[in-house]
Image (spheres, rainbow, N blue to C red):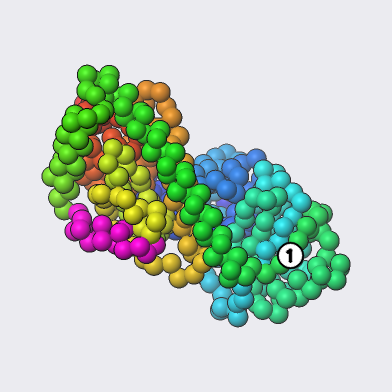
Amino acid sequence: MVLYQMTDSKKRLELFEVLCSLPLPDFLKLEIGLAIPSGIMPNYDTALGLRTAKLLEWVEGSSGCGMEKLEEVISYVRERPPENKRVKSLTVTLKFSLDELDAVKLGDILSDIQQKVGSDSIEVFNVQRGSVILHLSGSEDDLHKLKELFDKGELTSLADIAVDNIDFESEEYSDSRNDRLINSLEQSLAEVRVLNERKYASEISGSGHFLHGNSRVQLLQELKSNLVKTRQGTPDNQDILDSLHSGELWIVNSRRRNGLIINYGFISHFAGPGAAVGGEIDKDCIDAVALGSLSLIKPESSDDLQKAIKIRTQWLRLLTNFTDKPLSRDRVLLLLEQFRSYFDESVVEKIPDEAFALLIGVLPSTVRDVRNTGKT
């Protein structure tokens, strides 16, 4: 096998997009199929985009499997087998630390499960903390067989890891879990709003403005006016706002290079591919900027919705890491670099300075200066 570096940035972005658009079960199968060594990939609760970047870094490195092998495994996992009859998801709780779980160990666990039920229909479609909780799907008979083995005391471990519990996930549990995830996301959004406004207040105070009274209202109106003026060539803004205010939850299409910058006044949030938007989360938004060819789709299942809420949280954490940086120029540089890794330069160029500024608590003039410096 010939190892080579992918020098064509456009092809690399296309491959990155393909990997990010893989359903989580397929991405997990991809990692297992590549047998990625321990210590290479970040934890399973890390944002998929960051996991994808780390995977590509390893593949192209001296110890990686090479692009040919990656493309071979991608082709395999994307060839979906005929659908088996499905039931509510089965959860397996292991007495194990998520920090120690890697692709090799996950592959061993899955192989042990398939061997015990005598079928390869079962697959892992999600991994979460607590200690390690695997969410499995498969044929009805195979999932019930696995549950019965545990209930009879004949299944106490998987790949030498103790099994704490195995049970089917009820619809009531799914609904309750959705509510908990949404509440957690709303709390995180509120915390980020406080952080962004504090950063923004510091920026404005440093420039001689004051973040209160008439000056605050006047600056807000100016920012929103500039956003409207610079939103030429994007989908109709009112249609987007109507969707966000409809009370329904939507998902930013994960199979497109698109997204939304959602504004709430003096701060904005970014919802990238796969993220949940609308519902209670964005009921207070006052504006939105569409990126790329925006496509909002409805979740087809509770699992789809849970995944989308988690992805929205991951995007939020990513931008929070940028906002935490003390220097405003550093925040802008990190943000621009991140957006350029996800979107074509032509899309990034159309994003207003005001939209970027409100994502990370800086002044639009700071964004403008950094962007102009990069062109010289």
Left or right: where 313 falls relative to 86: left
**Whole-percent x, y for residue 365 in the image:** 21, 28
Left or right: where 123 falls relative to 376: right
Name the residue: 62% across, 53% down. 128
Locate the C terminus by quadrant. top left
Magenta part of the chain: 234-249
- Disc 1 designates what residue? 166
Left or right: where 230 falls relative to 168: left
Name the residue: 40% across, 35% down. 194
- Picture layout, residue 303 above or below residue 211: below
The answer to whether residue 39 is magenta is no
Quarter-of-image position of residue 135:
bottom right
Quarter-of-image position of residue 169:
bottom right
Q: Of all residues shown, which one is farthest toward the front?
A: 213
Question: What amino acid is labelled 1 in the image?
Answer: Ile
Name the residue: 29% across, 24% down. 203
